[in-house]
Image: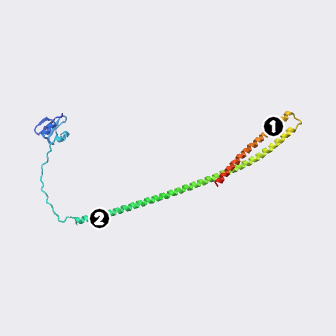
């Protein structure tokens, strides 16, 4: 436990613990020393001694009371107290009314500005929507025109192909008829050839007949497909005039 020494200005005494110091009723100016500090300190400079210090009040100095000045009618700014308060309250009401009016006007102006901004934004939005709709309509018309152009070109290509198909079919049909006639002649002709030569000629003619029939069949299938496609195009045009 820490032990303390005290000095009364003439000599030092101690050591004392906290309880003994409290009994001695040391004051804040009492010199105190304990092991661990290089020099004497006053008791007020040591934290653990603050609770045991004896408080010494300063000497009392009597002050004579000042005589009161009585005013029968106190005035403020040259006005009777009551009148001043009434005038002050009236002025406050006027100022408050002016402030409220200014705030209301500012609020109205701000609200008008917001409404104007909103109206402009709505108008701008409507213009943008109109432009978008017009752009969509233009694109739709362009797509329609492009579709009509492609359809027209396709119809022309189909009709041209059908014409070529018909010409080829007539040509192959004519060559088929000619081959059939040649086959009849080959079967009837007997002079200046052997049976083998006759069979070779007949086989060649039959091969030609088979090829012509096959070509005619392919042309008919192609014509049927083209007719079907043309019918679909025509039906689509009737549905979307």
| Camera-side mark, 2 or 1 | 1
Q: Position of residue 43 (x, y in %)?
A: 16, 40
Q: Residue at x 48, y 58 (%)?
A: 122
Q: Write down the residue under mark 2.
A: 91
Q: Residue at x 46, y 58 (%)?
A: 118
Image vertical order of residue 241 relative to residue 71, above or below: above
Q: Residue furthest right?
A: 191
Q: Position of residue 112 (x, y in %)?
A: 42, 61
Question: Does 227 sit left or right of 95 as displayed?
Answer: right
Image vertical order of residue 7 relative to residue 150, above or below: above
Question: Does 240 sit left or right of 213 as displayed?
Answer: left
Of residues 232 and 158, the one nearer the viewer is 232
Q: Position of residue 67 (x, y in %)?
A: 13, 60
Name the element at disc 1: helix
Q: Position of residue 129 (x, y in %)?
A: 53, 56
Question: Does 169 sit left or right of 111 as displayed?
Answer: right
Q: Write down the residue under mark 1.
A: 204
Q: Residue furthest left?
A: 10
Q: Residue at x 64, y 51 (%)?
A: 147
């Amino acid at each position: 436990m820490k032990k303390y020494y005290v000095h009364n200005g003439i000599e030092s005494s101690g050591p004392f613990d906290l309880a003994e110091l409290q009994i001695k009723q040391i004051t804040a100016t009492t010199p105190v020393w304990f092991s661990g500090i290089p020099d004497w300190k006053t008791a007020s400079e040591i934290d653990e001694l603050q609770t045991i210090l004896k408080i010494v009040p300063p000497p009392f100095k009597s002050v004579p009371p000042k005589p009161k000045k009585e005013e029968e009618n106190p005035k403020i700014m040259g006005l009777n107290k009551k009148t001043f308060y009434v005038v002050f309250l009236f002025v406050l009401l006027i100022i408050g009314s002016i402030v409220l009016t200014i705030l209301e006007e500012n609020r109205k102006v701000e609200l008008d500005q917001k409404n104007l901004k909103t109206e402009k934004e709505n108008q701008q939005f409507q213009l943008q929507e109109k432009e978008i709709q017009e752009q969509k309509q233009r694109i739709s018309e362009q797509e329609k025109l492009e579709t009509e152009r492609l359809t027209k070109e396709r119809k022309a290509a189909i009709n041209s192909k059908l014409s070529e198909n018909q010409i080829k079919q007539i040509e192959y049909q004519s060559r088929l008829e000619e081959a059939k006639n040649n086959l009849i002649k080959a079967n009837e002709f007997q002079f200046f050839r052997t049976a083998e030569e006759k069979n070779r000629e007949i086989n060649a003619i039959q091969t030609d007949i088979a090829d012509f029939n096959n070509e005619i069949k392919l042309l008919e299938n192609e014509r049927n497909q083209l007719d079907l496609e043309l019918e679909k195009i025509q039906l689509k045009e009737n549905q979307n005039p």
